[in-house]
Image: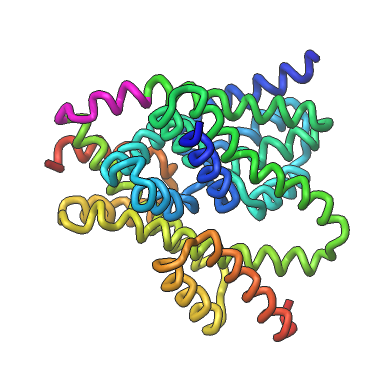
Amino acid sequence: MKRTLEIFWIFFKVSSITLGGGYSMLPVFYSELRKRNYISKEDFLKILGRAQALPGPVAVNTSVLLGIHLGGIRYAMAALLGVLIPPVVAILTAGTILLKYKDVWFIHRFFVGVRAGIVGFLAYFLYKLLRAKSRKIWEYILVTSAFVLMLHFPIIFVFPAMIALHLIMKGKMGDA
Amino acid sequence: MHEMIRMVLIFFKAGILAFGGGWTTINFLKRELVDIHHCLSYGEFLDILSVSQATPGPIAVNLATYVGNRMGGIITALACTFAVVASPMLFMMIFLKLVKKLSPSHIAMLDDSLHLGVVLLVSGALFSLLPAVLPDWRLMLISIVTFTILLKTGISPPLLILLMGIGGIFFCC
């Protein structure tokens, strides 16, 4: 029980202090767990790779997988709750207050500035994604066609269809 | 009750699309919440994204909690938050079972395809947020400055985005 509480506390603490969503939490998880000698670097990187390949917010996936790694479902649940409680409380309190005063001029301008920052960030994110792997022409054509389809059809169908098509085509070309 | 189930379903579906920090769900959620079900106006949707940057937590979780609270109170907020993590948890359980049967080369292939999928989802997110900055050259400038600073320095993105908010106080109207 003591260990469960400790794990809850680690994830709760990290989740409370890191702003800006999943990716900013990952290095802090690592240093907290490493400090206590709970995980090796290799295992952490393996878990990270898996968490990113799975659907779900990366912080949530990472904490559940880390919990399982540390000793099973009970720890996974403790880690999950630890990660989820701070944002839920923050949004229900601070978020609601902020949004209530969103028409005050400087808060409004702050939000507008943040919006523009988010767009810049997403462009950078996309740039990094495109730089990370060199792709063939047909892959660009595939993703562009999927993008056009996405404007007319629900992404929830277009996304898996594109993944499936990509897997099939790669399999046919035999360059796994 | 009807409303609550509808919301929970939207976020359950969104959870499947949430790769990375959850930015990948933005296109889907904007379409569902703003265009189809009219739960939020586009402006409100953008405001919640901004608040999410200023509070801890993955963006998909933040949106689920806020929208749930807004549509039906605390219970709906908790239900939506649960929904957005429940679908990936289900996937994870299936995956952890499957992964033992797949060879490493298959996993590498799947990884490669998912990476391309994330390119699609992030393009979608960018596309659905562009109307927020396009009409105003000052906002475009902030976006471009953000992009350039991220490219040239190792600053943490959330911090930079918040600094851009402070810039906005002096610069926007």
* In magenta segment, residue A146: no
Considering every residue shown, the one lying at the far top of the view is: A2
Q: Nearer the viewer, residue A23 or A159?
A: A159
Q: Nearer the viewer, residue B110 or B160?
A: B110
Front position in the image: B11 or A121? B11
- Outermost residue to the left: B173
Residue B118 appears at what percent x and percent y?
A: 54, 60
Q: Residue A164 location, x and y as percent?
A: 65, 71
Quadrant position of residue A173 = bottom right
Most distant residue in the right direction: B101
- Taking the spot 51% from the left edge, 45% from the top edge, the residue there is B10
The residue positioned 53% from the left and 37% from the top of the image is B5
Residue A144 percent location from the top left of the image: 45, 75
From this view, report whether residue A159 is shown above or below residue A56. Answer: below
In this view, A77 is above or below B23 = above
Dominant secondary structure of the residues highlighted in magenta in the image: helix
Tell me the quadrant of the picture where the C terminus of chain B can be found. top left
Residue situated in front as seen by the camera: A47 or B10:
B10
**Residue at figure coordinates x 49%, y 53% from the top left:** B24
User: As drawn, is B94 to the left or to the right of A157?
Assistant: right
Q: Quadrant of residue A62?
A: top right
Report the label total: 0
Residue shown at 18% from the left, 35% from the top: B169
Magenta run includes residue A104: yes
In the image, residue A140 sits, relative to residue B2, either above or below, namely below
The region drawn magenta spans A95-105
